[in-house]
Image (cartoon, coloured by chain):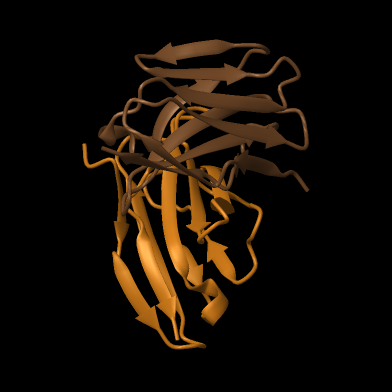
Chain colours: A orange, B brown
Amino acid sequence: NAGVTQTPKFQVLKTGQSMTLQCAQDMNHEYMSWYRQDPGMGLRLIHYSVGAGITDQGEVPNGYNVSRSTTEDFPLRLLSAAPSQTSVYFCASSLTPPNEQFFGPGTRLTVL
Amino acid sequence: GQQVMQIPQYQHVQEGEDFTTYCNSSTTLSNIQWYKQRPGGHPVFLIQLVKSGEVKKQKRLTFQFGEAKKNSSLHITATQTTDVGTYFCAGTNTGNQFYFGTGTSLTVIP
């Protein structure tokens, strides 16, 4: 099993550009989530999904969209990047909440 | 909104000393998880506590969940250099949304 994979590992964007962060898991987990990690602020939940076709907002959803068309994939879209979105983004999955969460390696995003 | 605070933010210890990090929630939690993140890495699950007053041990690590289910602690006995990293608590009251603490960064001086 590859576990939770994320692409890309690094990305630099200009303000106003859009992009999609990819996340996939091969553990047949129902629950998937996106977090952002900023210095001194821990991890903050952006969006989550409890199954294919079901998504909901977390603590800091503004500026981000998600969809869950399959159990395996949970992409995160930045519609119009802003410098405030410079962060490290982690995708996580678990069998069902609130069980152990498995994290991907992260995507380090810089918005200029 | 729900807040989970964690103290201290940083801790430097001599190898062999003990270490404790504390997690406090503004609301009652249904359960709490603890994670460890090595520098440059991703969070890795350590344990989950569910019951009021629960205490669990993993070798040199002892985890506690408060009687009121609003606080938790992680204690490491006789730290080793392999314990270096940031320790996060993550609490939930709905099961679907976890609120992470700000983390405690542990440095172990050989």
Q: Is B71 on the left-hand or right-hand side of A34?
A: right
The picture quadrant where one finds residue B96 is top right
Instruction: Relative to B97, say whether B40 is above or below.
Output: below
The location of residue A73, given as percent across then percent down, is: 38, 52
Quadrant for the C terminus of chain A, please.
bottom left
Using the image as rendered, state which of residue B51 and residue A55 is in the foreground: B51
Q: Going 54% across and 49% down the picture, which residue do you hit?
A: A53
The location of residue B44, given as percent across then percent down, is: 37, 37
Quadrant for the N terminus of chain A, please.
top left
Using the image as rendered, state which of residue B85 and residue A50 is in the foreground: B85
The picture quadrant where one finds residue B45 is top left
Residue A75 visible in the snapshot: no
Q: Is A62 on the left-hand or right-hand side of B86?
A: right
Q: Is B31 on the left-hand or right-hand side of A88?
A: right
Instruction: Relative to B28, say whether A110 is above or below.
Output: below
Q: Is B76 on the left-hand or right-hand side of B83?
A: right
Instruction: Relative to A96, say whether A104 is above or below.
Output: below
Q: Going 43% across and 25% down the picture, which residue do you hit?
A: B18
The location of residue B55, given as percent across then percent down, is: 55, 11
Instruction: Relative to B65, say whether A93 is above or below.
Output: below
The location of residue A88, given as percent across then percent down, is: 43, 62
